Image (cartoon, rainbow, N blue to C red):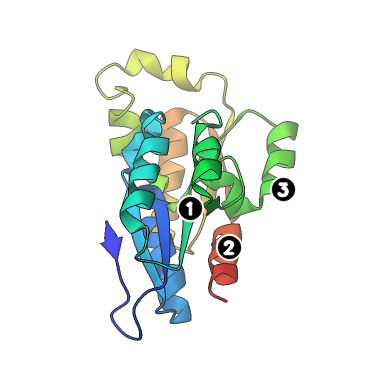
Amino acid sequence: MDSRPAEGGPPTTLLIACGALAREVVDVIRLNGWTHFSVTCLPAIWHNTPSKIPDGVRRKIDEARGRYDRILVLYGDCGSGGLLDRMLEEEGVERIDGPHCYAFYSGVEDFLAEADKDPTCFYLTDYLARHFDRLIIEGLGIDRHPELLPSYFGNYTTLVYLAQTEDAGLEAKAKAAADRLGLAYRYHFTGYGELGSFIQAASH
């Protein structure tokens, strides 16, 4: 996915984002009327193969060199084991702070403190609630092999829906997901959290 503002001057800042954040990133930009951002996204499914993320981001950076005044990355470490950060240090490119989107939606410090207190929570965002069946049930093969469900989720007790928008339809999907997994349900509205703050800071 690539997105450029329709009005105003040419974009001067490129945001390289995970596809799971695409809707939220574009919404933040549109809600604020910013015209100097361009957005390009890599496939969200790469979370299943995080070793692809550093090289994919590097290719986007290489393609953008000389075309933008600034390049920023909207990815957590996302399971890359520090490889993403090492690559970004080599390239001199900044990314949003945090290990994953759950953390920067909730606020990194708050999320890590809560996760440390209770490591038995499974998290959904708007994106994951919207695509739960495809990414979780089908993606993990539970639709074909329901006996796998306890292996994947037997150590969890609660599904926590970290909501970016107040959407009754998505909340219903999240509740249904908790029921499907046999987990307790908890709702926490985060808004765009530190994702919104990071993009806002980059707008100046």
Q: Earlier in the sequence, mark 2 or mark 1?
A: 1
Which residue position holds label 1? 74
Q: Is residue 149 visible?
A: yes
Label 1 neighbour load within 10 Å: few <14, some 14-19, many 20+ = many
Which residue position holds label 3? 110
x 28%, y 29%: residue: 138
Whole-percent x and y of residue 19?
Answer: 35, 49
Which residue position holds label 2? 198
Type of amino acid at the residue the image marks with label 2: Phe
**Label 2 to label 1, Cα distance in Å?**
9 Å
Quadrant in the rendering for residue 156: top right
Type of amino acid at the residue the image marks with label 1: Leu
Type of amino acid at the residue the image marks with label 3: Asp
Q: Earlier in the sequence, mark 1 or mark 3?
A: 1
Whole-percent x and y of residue 63?
Answer: 31, 53
Front label number (3 vs 2)? 2
x 55%, y 39%: residue: 85
x 66%, y 29%: residue: 119
Label 2 neighbour load within 10 Å: few <14, some 14-19, many 20+ = some
Total count of labels: 3
Label 3 neighbour load within 10 Å: few <14, some 14-19, many 20+ = few
In terms of depth relative to the viewer, which is nearer, 34 or 88?
88
Give left or right: position of 74 versus 59.
right
Mark 2 and mark 1 in contact? Answer it, CB < 8 Å.
yes
In terms of depth relative to the viewer, which is nearer, 34 or 177?
34
- Of the 4 image quadrants, the one containing the N terminus is bottom left
x 31%, y 43%: residue: 43
